[in-house]
Image (cartoon, rainbow, N blue to C red):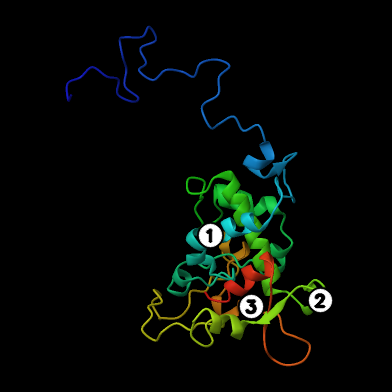
């Protein structure tokens, strides 16, 4: 098999008249999986600008898929609540984008898709890991995270069942306070020379200095719905609020 006749990539060949082993694409053909009939689904752009709509309806199945993909690929940097204070950031990696800043709260949906597909600053692209549909599912989940961290009592629809997070924690057999802030153990390694959190210098040419990077210590605190009276946090029993409640952990 080692000596079998075959073409080597990017090497010449005397088999074809043009001397190339790699053959040009056949005219008027499209490679498998590259048809891309729905341009917006595959690019996030409309008329050359980042669009601000989903290419398909969002339901609980889409949000659940988005949550799954987000937890796998995004939480190490952006954290479970999307405040940019993920575990590797807290250990010295470049600060990640905080989804709860004014800039990203108002960013069009196509912007998040574009960043996932093509990367941004220190963030690599995830085009190989996430299909276009999964990228949009993550985008939908990011919007649910933004709502979960900025929700108010008025956001709860009339007739929707609400229950305390403490009750959910107890029912699931989790430790008390599981849904609240977690602190790093004293043995955690920051990865910086002084052992402190990594802070991006302001006024430098570092693109992250103006692209949503932030000091994890200054990010928004985790928040949950709180009733008008009393201090027991609430959970709205639908996809958006469930996403927020499930992600009060980093």
Q: Which residue is mark 2?
A: 154
Disc sitting over residue 220 in the figure? 3
Q: Quadrant of residue 236?
A: bottom right
Residue reaching furthest bottom?
Answer: 230
Q: Residue 29 versus residue 9: which sits nearer the camera?
A: 29
Q: Residue at x 72, y 40 (%)?
A: 48
In this rendering, is residue 33 above or below 193? Answer: above
| Cα distance in 3D space between marks 3 and 1 | 23 Å
In this rendering, is residue 126 above or below 215? Answer: above
Judge left or right: residue 71 versus residue 15.
Answer: right
In this view, the mark in front (3 or 1):
1
Pointer 3 or 1: first along the chain: 1
| Cα distance in 3D space between marks 1 and 2 | 28 Å
| Residue 149: x %, y % from top left | 67, 74
Q: Residue at x 71, y 74 (%)?
A: 150
| Residue 122: x %, y % from top left | 50, 58
Q: Residue 113 versus residue 132: which sits nearer the camera?
A: 132
Mark 3 near mark 1, Cβ–Cβ under 8 Å? Answer: no
Disc sitting over residue 68 in the figure? 1
Q: Residue at x 56, y 75 (%)?
A: 215
Q: Secondary structure at mark 1?
A: helix
In this rendering, is residue 95 above or below 194? Answer: above
In this rendering, is residue 67 above or below 24? Answer: below
Q: Secondary structure at mark 3?
A: loop
């Amino acid at each position: 098999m080692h000596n079998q006749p075959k073409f080597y990539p990017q090497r010449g060949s005397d088999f074809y008249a043009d001397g190339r082993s790699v053959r040009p694409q056949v005219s008027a053909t499209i490679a498998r999986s590259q048809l891309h009939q729905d341009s917006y689904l595959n690019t996030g752009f409309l008329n050359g600008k980042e669009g601000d709509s989903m290419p398909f309806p969002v339901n609980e199945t889409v949000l659940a898929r988005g949550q799954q993909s987000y937890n796998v690929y995004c939480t190490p940097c952006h954290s479970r609540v999307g405040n940019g204070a993920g575990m590797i950031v807290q250990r010295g990696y470049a600060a990640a984008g905080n989804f709860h800043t004014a800039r990203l709260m108002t960013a069009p949906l196509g912007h998040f898709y574009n960043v996932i597909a093509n990367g941004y600053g220190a963030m690599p692209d995830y085009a190989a890991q996430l299909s276009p549909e999964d990228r949009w599912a993550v985008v939908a989940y990011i919007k649910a995270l933004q709502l979960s961290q900025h929700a108010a009592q008025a956001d709860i629809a009339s007739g929707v069942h609400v229950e305390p997070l403490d009750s959910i924690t107890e029912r699931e057999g989790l430790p008390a306070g599981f849904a609240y802030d977690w602190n790093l153990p004293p043995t955690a390694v920051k990865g910086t020379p002084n052992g402190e959190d990594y802070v991006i210098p302001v006024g430098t040419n570092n693109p992250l200095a103006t692209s949503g990077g932030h000091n994890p210590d200054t990010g928004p605190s985790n928040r949950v719905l709180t009733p008008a009276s009393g201090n027991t946090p609430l959970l709205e029993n639908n996809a958006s609020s469930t996403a927020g409640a499930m992600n009060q952990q980093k």
